[in-house]
Amino acid sequence: MIKIIWRTTAAGLLSLGLAGCTVKAVGDPNRPITINANVIVDIRSLKQTATSIEDLVAQGGKK
Amino acid sequence: MKKIWFGMSVLALVAAGSLLPAEAAHYDLKNMTPAVQNAITERQDRYSELQSLKSSGAVGENNHGYVEVFSGNAGVQSVAAAENRDRKIIYQTIADQNNLGPSGFAVVETIFGEVQRDKAGAGEPIQTPDGTWIKK
């Protein structure tokens, strides 16, 4: 009986664990972007970077 | 019985840990390579000219982070091509330095396109996410 409980619990939790490995984007929850396995694109972070670069271009271009 | 509970608790903790999203990296230019520095400098040099072309409606910002030409001579085409070449260098470097792969490169392009739309001035042509061209 104990072995059955153990096996069932382990199998269930293992399934949960594997399900938890699904790759999802974080940032804007309304725009999840799933790309390559093990890669999570933080959209907010990427947008900050993009904005910084475009600001740099604009500031340098207004010299 | 205690052993069972202890074991189950350990398994639960492991499972809970794996359910949490992996730590999201901060996507940035990790290294300012000479190619990226040159691309930024070139973009700065043509910034005013490109702004004029946008204001006149000759070029617009598409939803993939690049400029598109609507009218103008070979000079306009040349400016747009050079701008897009420099942008691609920057996008590709960000994707490469953050190990985002081809899919990630497309995400980088899209995000830059979004930023360009945000920054576009009133009346400039921009392409919305659904592909429609409008004047902002």
Image: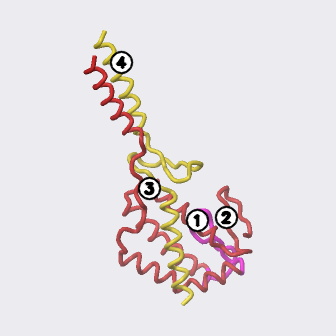
Determine if marks 4 and 3 fall on one subunit. Answer: no
Tag in front: 3 or 1: 1
Q: Which residue is mark 3?
A: B102
Give the residue type at disc 3.
Pro
- Tell me the kind of residue under disc 4: Thr
Give SS at disc 2: strand
User: In percent of the image, x 59 and y 48: which residue is there?
Assistant: A30
* Magenta residue span: B56-76
> Which of the two discs, 4 and 1, sits closer to the camera?
4
Picture coordinates of residue B69 (x, y %)? 64, 74
Label 3 Cα neighbours within 10 Å, binned few <14 / some 14-19 / many ≥20: some
Q: Is residue B102 left or right of A59 when viewed as pictured?
A: left
Q: Nearer the viewer, residue A44 or A60?
A: A44
Residue at 62% across / 72% down in the picture?
Answer: B119
Looking at the image, the residue that sits furthest to the front is B2
Give the mark nearest the N terminus, 3 or 1. 3
Q: Residue at x 44, y 56 (%)?
A: B102
| Local crowd size for mark 4, using a 10 Å CA cut-off: few (<14), some (14–19), many (≥20) | few
Instruction: Say the numbered circle drawn on residue B94.
Output: none
Residue annotated with mark 2: B127
Disc 3 to disc 1, how far (Cα)?
17 Å
